[in-house]
Image: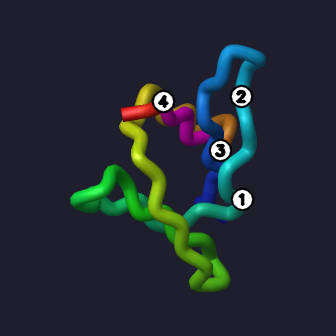
Amino acid sequence: MCEANAYLLTTDGEELILESVDRVVPHEDGLLLEDIFGRRKIINARIRELALVDHKIILERG
């Protein structure tokens, strides 16, 4: 599988935002994340790092 989990950087580390993310699309309010089940979440953040071997998308507040 090619999907990854999306995490938001916080002062305490990383907070899981959405699992099994299949799509990341730029959105006027930040990023639109969509998982393999079609669930969507819009978050005011930007991509900090893509760790594809680890299946992680690291985001930081935009």
Residue 37 rendering spot, x and y as whole percentages: 66, 83
Q: Residues within 10 Å of mark 2 (few under 14, many from 20)?
A: some
Provide the residue designation for mark 1: 19
Instruction: Report how far apart the C-alphas of labels 4 and 2 lie in the structure.
Output: 10 Å
Q: Which residue is mark 2?
A: 14
First in sequence: mark 2 vs mark 1? 2
In this image, 32 relative to 5: left or right?
left
**Residue 50 versus residue 17: which sits nearer the camera?**
17
Q: Quadrant of the N terminus?
A: bottom right
| Numbered circle sitting on residue 60 | 4
The correct choice, above or below, for 23 with respect to 7 in the image is: below
Density class for disc 4 (Cα within 10 Å; few <14, some 14-19, many ≥20) is: some
Q: Nearer the viewer, mark 2 or mark 1?
A: 2
Residue 10 image offset from top left, x and y in percent: 65, 23
Q: Are marks 1 and 4 in contact (CB under 8 Å)?
A: no
- Name the residue located 61 percent from the left edge and 26 percent from the top edge: 9
* Viewer-closest of 19 and 50: 19
- Residue type marked 3: His
* Residue 55 at x, y percent in the picture: 65, 44
The magenta span reads 56-60
Identify whether 54 is placed above or below 48.
below
For badge 4, the amino acid type reads: Glu
Image point (37%, 55%), residue name: 31
Query: What is the secondary structure assignment of the residue under circle 4?
Result: strand
CA gap, disc 2 to disc 3? Answer: 14 Å
Q: Which mark is residue 55?
A: 3
Does residue 31 appear left or right of residue 49 in this picture? left
